[in-house]
Amino acid sequence: MLKRIAALLLSVVFIVAAVPCVQAITYTEIEQKEASTAQHLLTCPVPKVSSIGGEWLVIGLARSGKLPQQTSDGYYANVQSYIKSVGGAKLHRSKSTENARVILALTAIGKDPQNVNGINLLQPLADFDFVKKQGVNGPIWTLLALDSFQYEIPVDSNVKRQTTREGLIEYILDNQCADGGWDLNGETADPDITGMAIQALAPYAKQNDNVKTAVQKALDLMSSIQSDDGDFSTMGEVTPESCAQMICALSAMQIDCNTDSRFIKKENTVFDSLMRFSVENGFAHVKGMEYNQMSTEQGYYALAAYSRMKNNKASLFDMTDLISKGDVNQSGAATISDATLIQKYIAKAVAFSLLQQKTADINKDGKVDINDVTALQKQLAA
């Protein structure tokens, strides 16, 4: 009898030993992958206006602080040539995302998309009918582009419906699927589109109850559909792009997807899933296959987004961090004149643009008041 019990215990030991011990990827490993991928992307040809080998590469490298000036200048020259070739501000007759993508990239490299050789790339986005031709994708990326530097939306009296931030948010919320996510067809949540929508809505989630509810519903859904391997699937297929968008979305919401229990399934996180696509120099689109440029660019900017969140920096697409805090008059540096200007704004003697309001919020509490004047004066006296 004792021999039988001993044999049984021994077999249990073997069974347990046969189960691999799963260890979530560490932040050090994430940093190492970010560094090695950046090293490769820096060897790629000069970026052009394109969804591959273009803006995503520029944004990722720029927001991680690794974009060389020479590459930045080369990309800007390519943008200028491209705009000249299309003959105007509208970069595609039906895809507003073309404009939005270039606006984001130009903002990331410190160029003004409102004046590229006299062309204002924001102007076509004033036409809401144009913006929503791509369904919810258009409003999502238009909102991200406009909010990237708190750009004022151009006014166009010739369009049937003027684009407003309120209109963009309303459209995105109205197109939320019944299950809580977003999809181009408005039926069943797609992690790619859901991740993009969360990123666009993230800045409004604290101050707008409708947005807060919608985003929370989406986050709950994404947590529930994440597989035990940490995966997110699009049309039944696990892709690195879906993983990347969810990493960006959670980072925009200040959620650490590598430590938050809601997004850890059997010790696997979305980073564990993304890293299963890891290959030399970047990422593959299909597990076990070779390097893919699109997957690498999206994977890389997701790594950059996460790194920014971990280091308490502005989110990937919030590029207002590129200006000096307190430089309300945009002179190049904060001065006592800016403190005076903020006082005038508080007294309602002057109006501020959205960008000026964000610049004047020195203590980052979401409002501009006398505390910001005091903080700026201390900053100048330091």
Image (cartoon, rainbow, N blue to C red):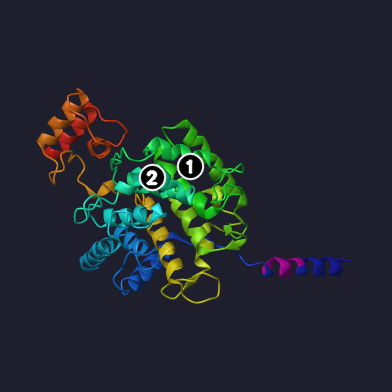
Side (left or right) of 218 relative to 323: right
What type of secondary structure mainly makes up the magenta span?
A: helix
Residue 148 visible somewhere in the drawing: no
Disc 2 is placed on an element classified as: helix
What range of the chain is rendered magenta?
12-17
Residue designated by label 1: 172
For image coordinates 17% across by 41% down, the residue present is 327
Residue 329 seen by the camera = yes
- Residue type beneath disc 2: Leu
| Pointer 2 with pointer 1, Cβ within 8 A | yes
Q: Report x, y in % for residue 66.
A: 28, 64
Q: Which mark is residue 125?
A: none
Mark 2 neighbour class, 10 Å CA radius: few under 14, some 14 to 19, many 20 or more? many
Going 27% across and 36% down the picture, which residue do you hit? 363
Residue 189: image location, x then y, percent: 58, 49
Task: Determine the residue located farthest toward the right in the rendered image.
Answer: 1
Whether residue 296 is in magenta: the answer is no
Q: Residue at x 56, y 40 (%)?
A: 217
**Label 1 packing within 10 angstroms: few (<14), some (14-19), many (20+):** many
Camera-side residue of 142 and 333:
142
Q: Nearer the viewer, residue 52 or 307?
A: 52
Identify whether 338 is placed above or below 44: above
Q: Quadrant of the C terminus?
A: top left
Residue that protrudes farthest toward the top in the picture: 347
Q: Camera-side residue: 120 or 286?
A: 120
Side of 276 relative to 45 (left or right): right
Cα separation, mark 2 vs mark 1, equals 10 Å
Left or right: 366, with 229 as reference point: left
Report the amino acid beneath label 1. Answer: Ile
Depth order, front residue of 166/228? 166
Q: Position of residue 137 (x, y in %)?
A: 46, 50
Where does label 2 land, which residue? Answer: 143
